[in-house]
């Protein structure tokens, strides 16, 4: 089963700052991680669409700045306490807190890593006119995501939906995206801990 986050990525400033740092040095980076497969990537970008950090640079930054594999889930944000002097009415029905979803099931490393992947993918798709599955796949490939990691590319009207399997080091991270121009959204989702990636079994 898959659980999905409803948060729309808003990390442009952080990614811009990161891009300035990593693009200050030119050269060839090589990655052998499971996400993109072994490949050589020019630091100045892949093709005409890769204007920010490459996948190899993103992964290197994740290794250096995110928690180690196996870190516990981040958990949902703690609700703010009631203002001083106010009490919760005895008859007030409090909502039941969920126990599934990215906040509960993704470890801290996955949560941290997802922020970088979400933003770079969304930015690459925002200006895409007529986002057909073929065009979306090409952009994802240009960003370094191999076909084996891209799943369920389907068009519905003017929107193309897709999943990316980012599981590695025992994590459960996946991304669910909908390419629709300026309405593009890329969110975290939770993949099965083991076994094949099957988007059709997801739950939201």
Image (cartoon, rainbow, N blue to C red):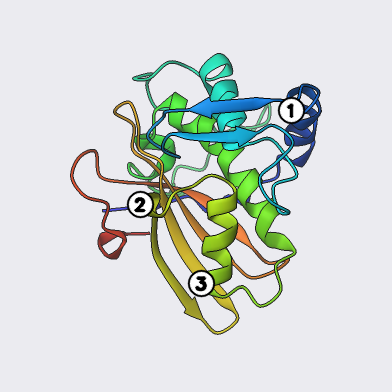
Q: In this rendering, would 24 be left or right of 119?
A: right
Image position of 186 (left or right of 12): left
Q: CA distance from mark 1 to mark 2?
A: 27 Å
Q: Nearer the viewer, residue 180 or 127?
A: 127
Please rate how many residues cluster around mark 1, counting C-alpha atoms within 10 Å: few if below 14, some from 14 to 19, many from 20.
Answer: some
Labels 1 & 3 near each other (Cβ < 8 A): no
Instruction: Look at mark 1 in the image and give the residue it sits on.
Output: 18
48 lies above or below 101: below
Q: Is residue 76 visible?
A: no
Q: Is 64 on the left-hand or right-hand side of 154? A: right
Q: Could you tell me which residue is drawn at 64 percent across and 63 percent down?
A: 184
User: Pointer 2: what residue?
Assistant: 148
Q: What kind of element bears circle 2?
A: helix
Q: Quadrant of residue 183?
A: bottom right
**In percent of the image, x 59 and y 51: which residue is there?**
142
Asked if 132 appears above or below 195 in the picture, the reply is: below
Q: Which residue is mark 3?
A: 133
Residue 40 location in percent, x, y? 54, 33
For residue 139, the mark is none
Specify which label sits upstream in the sequence, 2 or 3.
3
Disc 2 crowd, CA 10 A, few/some/many (<14, 14-19, 20+)? few
């Amino acid at each position: 089963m898959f659980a999905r986050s409803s948060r729309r990525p808003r990390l442009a400033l952080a990614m811009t700052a990161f891009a300035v740092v990593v693009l200050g040095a030119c050269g060839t980076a090589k990655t052998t991680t499971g996400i993109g497969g072994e490949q050589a990537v020019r630091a100045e970008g892949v093709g005409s669409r890769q204007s920010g950090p490459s996948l190899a640079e993103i992964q290197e930054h994740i290794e250096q700045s995110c928690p180690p594999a196996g870190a516990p889930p981040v958990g949902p944000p703690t609700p703010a306490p009631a203002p001083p002097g106010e009490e919760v009415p005895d008859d007030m029905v409090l909502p039941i807190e969920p126990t599934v979803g990215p906040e509960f099931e993704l470890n801290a490393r996955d949560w941290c890593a997802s922020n970088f992947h979400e933003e770079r993918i969304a930015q690459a798709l925002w200006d895409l006119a007529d986002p057909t599955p073929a065009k979306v796949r090409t952009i994802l490939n240009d960003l370094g995501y191999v076909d084996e990691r891209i799943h369920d590319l389907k068009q519905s009207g003017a929107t193309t939906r897709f999943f990316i399997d980012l599981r590695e080091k025992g994590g459960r991270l996946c991304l669910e995206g909908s390419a629709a121009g300026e309405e593009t959204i890329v969110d975290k989702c939770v993949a099965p801990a083991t076994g094949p990636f099957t988007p059709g079994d997801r739950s939201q």
